[in-house]
Image (cartoon, grey):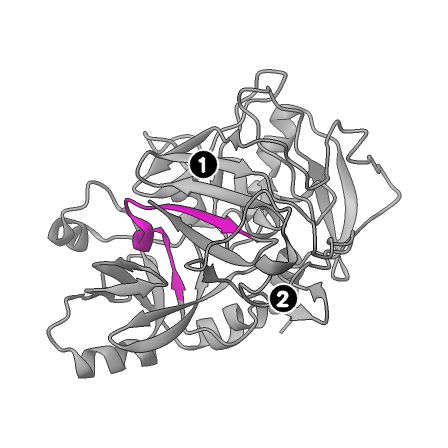
Amino acid sequence: MHLILIFAAIFNVGLNVGSTGQVSASEAGWNTTREIEHPIRMPARFHHGLVYLEPVSQGGDTLRFFTDTADATLMYRQAVDRTGLTTTSAIIQGQQQLAAFLPPFDSLHFIPPPLVSDGLIPVRPDDRMPPHHRIILGDDDGVRTGDGILGSTWFASRAWSINFREETFDVIPVSESGSESESESGSGAGTNGANQQSDNPDSAIQPPETAVPLTFYEEGDRRMYHFPGIDVVIAGDTVSMVLKTGSNIILNDEAQSLIGHPDALLPTGLISESVAEKWLDAHPEWTIYENADSNYGSDLIEVPEVRIGPHTAGPVRFAIRRDEAFVEWFSQFTYKPVVGALGSDAFRDTHITINYPWSVLDFHD
């Protein structure tokens, strides 16, 4: 339980900054308001559909972050030391942590700060970097590890256009007209679903009727967590999942050869063991790669089609995880219980917008 509380502290949005070493976001040169007047192209690099951002500080330092809509937001100590950032004591959900502001960035290689934590990002010691982080954050030759993860609290409160076809990633304007703004503690606007269009006539982004609803864990009008929930249809059944754009596994050599993948890092979804068993009982012809995941020793199942609102994806691969991974972990951050995670493997060759204020995902032609 103690470990769960620590991780919940990382993922949650409430943050109070301690008095020691305190530096405000405005003093750090950041604008932490939601308003963006025009789309801003992120310094993104795509790898098999997984998205990395490589901003450059005004001092000329290049940072490298992995992005994932359902992961923690954090920066490793090596990045803080290399860029000379000032750290501060921060309390997140009762857990005192070290945190820092991102450095001011070059205007051509810019990423925005997280809104819900007033621009602060938790700092983790390098020795707390798990092995799979070293793989997903490493550069092409696998030597240099990256600087951190931009997760749920970084994506929160903005709208993001991700074009997997053209490999571009933009933060785009969205109006707050007709919706409640998020407070400093992370309280959220809107409701669980795509029902805000008529209340937002002045929005810079009007979700079409085909937009796919996203749900978030809320208490009253307060958005507690920023893990997007999404319903998909597989083999005629509606399956509740968390949208996890950075979901991936590390293939073993045999699976990599069977799949014909160029390297070990494979974007996949995740699915609970009990649901996977039902799929295989009903569809024994579906392809399964046994023990494909070198980290967990788990199987990989290939689903012919996944329907996401108006879009049909396929085939889509899901790594099998114990039910507890969803019952005891992901579901505590989502509006309703989830049994899987939908990754970028389901969005190959698409152009989507993930709109957090509107709580929708939209597909573009």
Mark carried by residue 169: 1
Taking the image as shown, residue 265 lies to the left or right of residue 326, namely: left
Label 2 Cα neighbours within 10 Å, binned few <14 / some 14-19 / many ≥20 = many
Q: Quadrant of the C terminus?
A: top left
Tag in front: 2 or 1: 2
Residue beneath the point at 19% across and 40% down: 262
Is any part of residue 338 visible from this angle?
yes
Residue 294 colored magenta? Answer: no
Q: How many marks?
A: 2
Farthest-out residue, right = 19
Amino acid type of the residue tagged 1 in the rendering? Phe
What separation in Å lies between label 2 and label 1 (alpha carbons)? Answer: 26 Å
x then y, percent, for residue 16: 81, 52
Q: Quadrant of the N terminus?
A: bottom right
Residue beneath the point at 40% across and 64% down: 341
As helix, strand or loop, the secondary structure at mark 2 comes to loop
Of 23 and 157, nearer the camera is 157
Taking the image as shown, residue 153 lies to the left or right of residue 50, namely: right
Mark 2 or mark 1, earlier in chain: 1
Segment tinted magenta in the rendering: 341-355
Taking the image as shown, residue 158 lies to the left or right of residue 24, namely: left
Mark carried by residue 105: none
Which residue in the protein does label 2 denote? 191
Amino acid type of the residue tagged 2 in the rendering? Thr
- Residue 66, compared with residue 217, is above or below; it is above
Is any part of residue 296 visible from this angle?
no
Label 1 Cα neighbours within 10 Å, binned few <14 / some 14-19 / many ≥20 = many
Of 221 and 113, nearer the camera is 221
x then y, percent, for residue 180: 73, 57
As helix, strand or loop, the secondary structure at mark 1 comes to strand
